[in-house]
């Protein structure tokens, strides 16, 4: 367990209220039911950026996610430590090809790909039947280091995030950011389709 309470080998529950219009608020809980992360992402923002906090009062930032550009087809997001500015990882969306299946490339600090975040299962059917549950996985150097599985619930969005990255050298905060970006992309797509 690192100082931020996020382990490289654990399962978390991510929830988001179904009815939220001005922002997307995510809460991440550990298996004991304790809040581990809190994210409030504004819907209307020119450049996508948000912080992962350890508390709902948003006083203890844990990681920062920042898009490099305001408008693009293939967005690039850098995940950093908010106190030191240390780079934790980079994600690049695949733009047009993600219309059918959401896919992100995980990049090294200098831009070469080392893995990906991929939507699994019936991605095309989910575009037409949004009540079908979503599934994603994060792969680095050919190894699956995290999975995200949506659980069907009424009036709330709920996901199980399983991280199995112990011994990989990957900061689990980066994997949390990967999961939250995938879920935000899902929300954006559902908004457009309404």
Image (tube, rainbow, N blue to C red):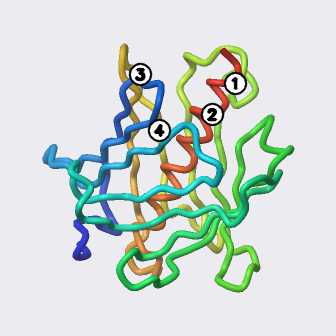
Residue 98 on image: x %, y %: 78, 43
Rendered residue at 58%/38% (across/down) = 44
Q: Which mark is residue 188?
A: 2
- Looking at this view, is 4 or 165 the one in front? 4
Q: Up-down: is 14 above or below 158? A: below
Mark 4 neighbour class, 10 Å CA radius: few under 14, some 14 to 19, many 20 or more: some
Q: CA distance from mark 4 to mark 3?
A: 17 Å
CA separation, marks 2 and 3?
Answer: 13 Å
- Per the rendering, the mark at residue 18 is 3
Sequence-wise first label, 1 or 4: 4
SS at badge 2: helix
Badges 4 and 3: C-beta atoms under 8 Å apart?
Answer: no
Q: CA distance from mark 1 to mark 4?
A: 22 Å
User: Cα distance, mark 1 to mark 2?
Assistant: 6 Å
**Closest to the observer: 194 or 104?**
194
- The tag on residue 149 is 4
| C-beta proximity under 8 Å, tags 1 and 2 | yes
């Amino acid at each position: 367990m690192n100082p931020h309470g996020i382990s490289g080998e654990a399962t978390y529950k991510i929830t988001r209220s179904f009815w939220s219009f001005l922002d997307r608020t995510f809460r991440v809980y550990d298996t004991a039911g304790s809040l581990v992360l809190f994210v409030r992402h504004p819907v209307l923002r020119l450049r996508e950026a948000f912080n992962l906090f350890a508390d709902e009062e948003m006083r203890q930032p844990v990681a920062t996610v920042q898009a490099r550009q305001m408008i693009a087809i293939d967005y690039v997001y850098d995940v950093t430590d908010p106190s030191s500015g240390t780079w934790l990882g980079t994600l690049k969306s695949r733009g047009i090809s993600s219309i059918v299946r959401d896919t992100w490339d995980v990049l090294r600090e200098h831009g070469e790909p080392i893995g990906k975040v991929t939507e699994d299962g019936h991605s095309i059917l989910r575009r037409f039947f949004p009540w079908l549950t979503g599934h994603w996985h994060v792969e680095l150097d050919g190894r699956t280091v995290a999975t995200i599985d949506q659980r069907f619930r009424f009036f709330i969005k709920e996901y199980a995030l399983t991280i199995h990255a112990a011994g990989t050298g990957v900061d689990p905060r980066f994997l949390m950011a990967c999961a939250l970006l995938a879920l935000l992309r899902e929300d954006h797509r559902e908004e457009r389709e309404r």
